[in-house]
Amino acid sequence: MAEMPSGEPRCTNLDGYSDVARIVIVGKAGSFVPSNRIDVDAGWARRNGFLNRELVLVGREGGSPSVECCLVATSFADDGEDDGGLAEAKAQTTLHVMERLGIDAGDRACVSIRKLSNALLVKRVAVQRIDKVREGSIAVSDDLYHELREIEEGWASKRRRFYRLNHLATGALYYVPFDKIERDPSLAAQTVRLSRYQRMLLNLHAPPCVMDGVLKDLVENAEIDQATKQSLFDRYARDALLVPDSYDEQQSIMRNLRSCGYDTLQITESAFEEPSSLWAKVPKAISGFMVGNSSILLKSCRPFANDEERDIVRLSHSAMVHLGIDESDKVILRHGKAKARARALPIDSMERIMETNTIAREADIDPLVGIPASMRRSLGVCDLDEAVLVERDTGYLFRKNLNAQFMPVLLFFLAIVQTGYLFGTVVLGYSLLASVVGLPIIAFIMFSEQRAKVK
C-alpha cells in the first residue's frame, strides 16, 4: 500500500497538496472489479498524497460530472509507445468510468483526481465492548469524533446522514449512521471499535483468502522485520486459497497483517434516502406494524451463474432466518438513494457460489448477498464487497398472508352480517361496526406468526 507523506493531516483534504492532481487516461484497466476502478502509477500516487484503494473523485476537463472511483496504485509495464513525457502521469480505468466521463475507449483524455472532502483516516481497529454490540454502534477516539461532529454540524441536508468505512486493504465498504457513532475517550488516536460482524463485513475478522497485488504491496512496503514478511509470504504460497489450519494460526496471521497496516480504514460521508411522501410512509408503517420489520447489512457478491438474468438474490440460511423470510419471499435492497425488489433464494451450494466468487471458508458465506450485475448497477453498487441494506418486504408479506387467510376473514364478516339480519336493523348496524373494529384485530392476530419470526 502506498504510504502517506510524512506530516499529512488526518483529515485528508487537498490543502496540503495541489488543488487538483491531473493525469491522462491511456486505456482500459486490466481488471473490471470494482467497476469504478482507476489505476495509477504507485510513485505518482505517493507524490500526490493518495492512498492505495482510497475513494476519490475523478472529473474530466470542461465541467463534466465527477465520478467516485476506487484509486488503485500499481505499476504500468512499458508498452513501447510515446507517452509524450507522461510516463508516470498516466492512468487506466474501466469502461463504466469511461462511459460516465464521456471518454471513448481509444481516447487519451486528461482527467483530474481529487480527494473526497471530509475524509478521515483510521489506523487501528479495536474490539467493540460487549454491552454495545447489540446496539449495532461503533466507537471512535476523541480526535475522530470531534471531526465527525464538525462535519455533521456543517451538513445542511435533511436526509439521514451515514458514514462509510472503506477498508483500504480489500476495498470492502460498511455504512453506519451518525447516531450509531459513539465517543470513547479511552481509545488511542485514530482508532475505532467494531463488533465481530462489522469486522466481518469489512474483511477484518479473518485473514483474506488470497494475497492479491494490494496485499502483497502492503506487506512488502511495511516497516517490519523481514522474517515476519517472509512468514506471511510462505503461508500464502501453500495453496491458491489460504485456509488456516487452526484458530491459533489464523490469529497469528492477523497479528502479522495488522503490524503491516492491514487495519487502515477511510471514513467518508454518505447518505441514505428515506421515504418522504405520506403515501409511501403510511402503507409501509401499516404493513410493518402487522408483520414486523427486520433488516440486515450484507456484503454484495455475485449470485449463481443462472441468476444473472432474473430478479433473484442469494442469501445465506442465517440471513434468511434473521429476516424471517422463506424461500422465494421478496426482499428490498437499499443503497443510497436507490432501492430494488427481488425474490430471495438460499445459497444452498458452496461449490456453486465459489464458481463466481473467491470464497475459501463456508463461514464466509454468512454475511453475503448474491446480487445480479444489472441490479448492482441500478443500485449503484460498484464494489463486490460493498455493504447493502436488505429488508424483508413487509408489503409483500402482508399481501401473502392476507391471501392465505382470506376465507376465514370472509366467513367472520358474513357471520356478523347474518347475525344483524336475524335480529333487526339496529343490531345490523352494531354488527357492521363490530366487524369494522374486529377485522383489524383479527388480522393482527393472524400475523402474529410472522411477527414472531423477527422477535
Image: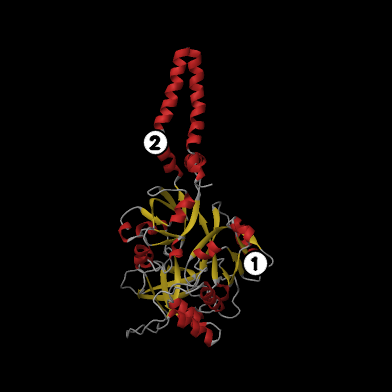
Q: Residue furthest right?
A: 185
Q: Residue at 36% of width from left, 58% of height from top?
A: 372
Front in this rendered view, residue 403 or 173: 403
For marks 2 and 1 on the same chain, the one whose residue lies earlier in the sequence? 1
Rendered view: 180 above or below 144: above
Rendered view: 421 above or below 215: above
Secondary element type, mark 1: loop
Q: Is residue 284 left or right of residue 139?
A: left
Residue at the spot of label 1: 141
Q: Residue at 52% of width from left, 27% of height from top?
A: 437
Q: Position of residue 327 (x, y in %)?
A: 39, 49
Q: Position of residue 172 (x, y in %)?
A: 48, 66
Location of residue 315 by image quarter: bottom left
Report the disc number at residue 157: none
Front in this rendered view, residue 140 or 315: 315
Residue at the spot of label 2: 403
Location of residue 78 by image quarter: bottom left
* Disc 1 residue type (three-letter): Ser
Location of residue 73 by image quarter: bottom left
In front: label 2 or label 1: 2
Secondary element type, mark 2: helix
Label 2, label 1: how far apart the Cα atoms are: 52 Å
Q: Residue furthest top?
A: 424
Front in this rendered view, residue 247 or 91: 247
Number of numbered discs present? 2
Rendered view: 433 above or below 361: above
Crowd rating for badge 1 (residues with CA inside 10 Å; few <14, some 14–19, many 20+): many
Q: Confirm whether residue 43 shows in the render.
A: no
Q: Position of residue 27 (x, y in %)?
A: 34, 75
* Disc 2 residue type (three-letter): Asn
